[in-house]
Image (tube, rainbow, N blue to C red):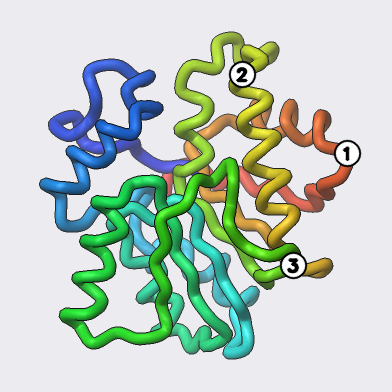
């Protein structure tokens, strides 16, 4: 899936700025809410068939999204965990949930390249625009630089580790299918059964 990128007035001067943790702390310190690639309502029809009350869900790179709350409203009650590298984003999200009296969503400071969870902890892992950050300085899309490939592989290996054996990973991305396919070919331990390229939503 793909959609428009962030508004120009909050974007860093160059694409590589998305790799700088201080950019995110500064942005989340000012910004109340932003949904990368639209909000849940735009792709609910794709996620709803995967959801059930007993599902345990991990959202990687939650930022200040309301996806966790939307999943809770959909009846997911097996535990929703949202992680982000930015302590600012995490604290603001915790404050928002507390102010709303929302329970059932746990928000944790964590690096997507080193997820602090036990193996086979989640039925469903979702990322929405988070993996795209790793591609911002990837170079040639057919031959991305080694650092990009290593980081993307590390992220996917972490996700694979925390997923249950029949778990599902959903990636909502602005990336081109060719980038995903290149990563897929280098990850024999992970089975990609479906790639849906919806275009702009």
Secondary structure under badge 1? loop
Nearest the eye: 47 or 187: 187
Q: Earlier in the sequence, mark 2 or mark 1?
A: 2
Q: Which residue is denoted by mark 3 in the rendering?
A: 120
Q: Is residue 89 left or right of residue 41?
A: left
Examine the rendering and report whether any part of residue 1 can be seen.
no
Nearest the eye: 133 or 3: 133
Q: CA distance from mark 3 to mark 2?
A: 27 Å
Q: Earlier in the sequence, mark 1 or mark 3?
A: 3
Secondary structure under badge 2? helix
Nearest the eye: 48 or 92: 92
Q: CA distance from mark 1 to mark 3?
A: 19 Å
Examine the rendering and report whether any part of residue 84 can be seen.
yes
**Residue 198 on image: x %, y %:** 55, 47
Mark identifier at residue 188: 1
Mark identifier at residue 147: 2
Secondary structure under badge 3? loop
Q: Residue at x 48, y 69 (%)?
A: 81
Mark identifier at residue 164: none
Q: Residue at x 41, y 52 (%)?
A: 84
Q: Is residue 69 left or right of residue 22?
A: right
**Residue 162 on image: x %, y %:** 69, 60
Name above or below for residue 6 compared with residue 121: above
Single out the residue that lies furthest toward the right.
Answer: 188
Q: Quadrant of residue 52?
A: bottom right
Q: Dot 3, crowdedness within 10 Å: few (<14), some or many (≥20)?
A: some
Q: Quadrant of residue 155?
A: top right
């Amino acid at each position: 899936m793909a959609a428009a990128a962030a508004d120009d007035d909050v974007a860093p001067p160059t694409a590589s700025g998305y790799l700088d943790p201080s950019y995110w702390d500064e942005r989340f310190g000012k910004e109340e809410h932003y949904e990368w690639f639209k909000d849940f309502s735009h792709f609910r029809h794709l996620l709803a068939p995967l959801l059930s009350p007993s599902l345990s869900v991990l959202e990687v790179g939650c930022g200040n999204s309301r996806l966790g709350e939307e999943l809770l409203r959909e009846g997911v009650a097996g535990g929703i965990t949202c992680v982000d590298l930015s302590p600012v984003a995490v604290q603001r999200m915790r404050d928002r949930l507390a102010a709303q009296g929302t329970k059932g969503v746990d928000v944790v400071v964590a690096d997507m390249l080193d997820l602090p969870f036990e193996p086979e902890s989640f039925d469903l892992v979702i990322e929405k625009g988070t993996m795209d950050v790793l591609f911002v300085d990837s170079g040639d899309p057919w031959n991305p630089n080694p650092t990009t490939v290593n980081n993307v592989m590390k992220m996917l290996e972490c996700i694979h580790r925390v997923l249950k054996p029949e778990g599902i990973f959903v990636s909502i991305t602005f990336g081109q299918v060719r980038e995903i396919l290149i990563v897929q070919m280098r990850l024999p331990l992970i089975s990609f059964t479906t790639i849906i390229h919806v275009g702009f939503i």
